[in-house]
Image (cartoon, helix red, strand yellow):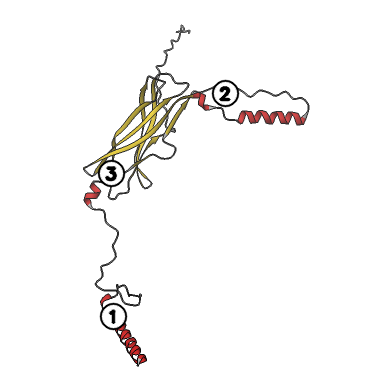
């Protein structure tokens, strides 16, 4: 009798479990917790999201980012020193000794000098920013560069000139590039002097996508500003004409 009761309870429990699984399968659908990947996709499911398009309002508010390229954040100037000619070595007649002496002299000449004592000033860029406006199919930018000037051992108070370049690129195309010989008055050689330079004349075609890149930094390859000195007039002596 006990075996029949236990067997009946077991069959009843098994039937109840089957009913619960069948009901859960009907309710879960293709995306339910019991989906094992064998069912078809739900035709009513929304399509996957596509790449968002840039709206006209977003493009009008777009202002290209300004970055400082590697190697253009610092600008150092040094005094020019006259290079001394290499001393002539007297030959002793010993080929090995003469070769060793010549090698030592060449190594000493090839050793770079200590430039720290020749520094006039060191200039560095600490921050860059920009501002943009649109009109008549053109984008006008104001690029600002902030930095400081640290006088060196050879510095004397006065006006210094720093070559600062601003540029705007579209891929490999140069839309704008200008070198500025920016001058700063430095009067106290014992402290650093802060400066802010602004290029307000950056005008490029209005972008059709957010793919412009602006740059700012020092350009040591730019020609230095020179002052034209008036030439001295030379007076030639007149000679009497001879027949």
- Front position among marks 2 and 1: 1
Cα separation, mark 3 vs mark 2, equals 50 Å
Could you tell me which secondary element the residue under label 1 belongs to? helix
Query: Residue 182 at x, y = what percent?
Result: 36, 28
Residue nearer the viewer, 111 or 181: 111
Residue bearing mark 1: 20
The residue sitting at 24% across, 46% down in the picture is 61
The residue sitting at 27% across, 57% down in the picture is 52
The residue sitting at 66% across, 28% down in the picture is 105
Query: Residue 168 at x, y = what percent?
Result: 34, 41
Q: Residues within 10 Å of mark 2 (few under 14, many from 20)?
A: few
The earlier-in-sequence mark between 1 and 3 is 1
Q: Is residue 110 above or below residue 35?
A: above
Q: In the image, 84: left or right of 215? A: right
Cα separation, mark 1 vs mark 3, equals 60 Å
State the quadrant of the N terminus. Answer: bottom left
Q: Are marks 1 and 3 in contact (CB under 8 Å)?
A: no
Residue bearing mark 3: 63
Q: Is residue 235 above or below residue 33?
A: above
Query: Residue 224 at x, y = what percent?
Result: 42, 27
């Amino acid at each position: 009798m006990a075996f029949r009761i236990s067997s009946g309870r077991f069959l009843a429990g098994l039937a109840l479990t089957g009913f619960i699984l069948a009901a859960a399968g009907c309710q879960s659908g293709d995306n339910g917790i019991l989906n094992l990947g064998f069912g078809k996709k739900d035709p009513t499911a929304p399509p996957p999201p596509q790449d968002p398009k840039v709206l006209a309002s977003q493009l009008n508010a777009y202002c290209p980012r300004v970055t400082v390229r590697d190697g253009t954040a610092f600008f150092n100037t040094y005094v020019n020193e006259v290079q001394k000619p290499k001393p002539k070595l007297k030959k002793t007649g010993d080929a090995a000794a003469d070769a060793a002496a010549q090698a030592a002299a060449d190594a000493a000449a090839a050793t770079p000098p200590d430039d720290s004592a020749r520094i006039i000033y060191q200039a560095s860029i600490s921050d860059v920013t920009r501002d943009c406006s649109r009109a008549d199919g053109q984008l006008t930018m104001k690029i600002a560069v902030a930095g400081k000037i640290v006088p060196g051992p050879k510095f004397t108070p006065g006006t210094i000139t720093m070559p600062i370049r601003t540029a705007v690129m579209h891929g490999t195309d140069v839309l704008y590039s200008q070198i500025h010989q920016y001058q700063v008055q430095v009067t106290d050689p014992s402290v650093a002097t802060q400066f802010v330079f602004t290029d307000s004349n950056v005008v490029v075609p209005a972008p059709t996508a957010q793919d412009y890149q602006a740059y700012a930094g020092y350009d040591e390859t730019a020609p230095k500003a020179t002052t034209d000195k008036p030439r001295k007039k030379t007076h030639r002596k007149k000679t009497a004409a001879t027949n």
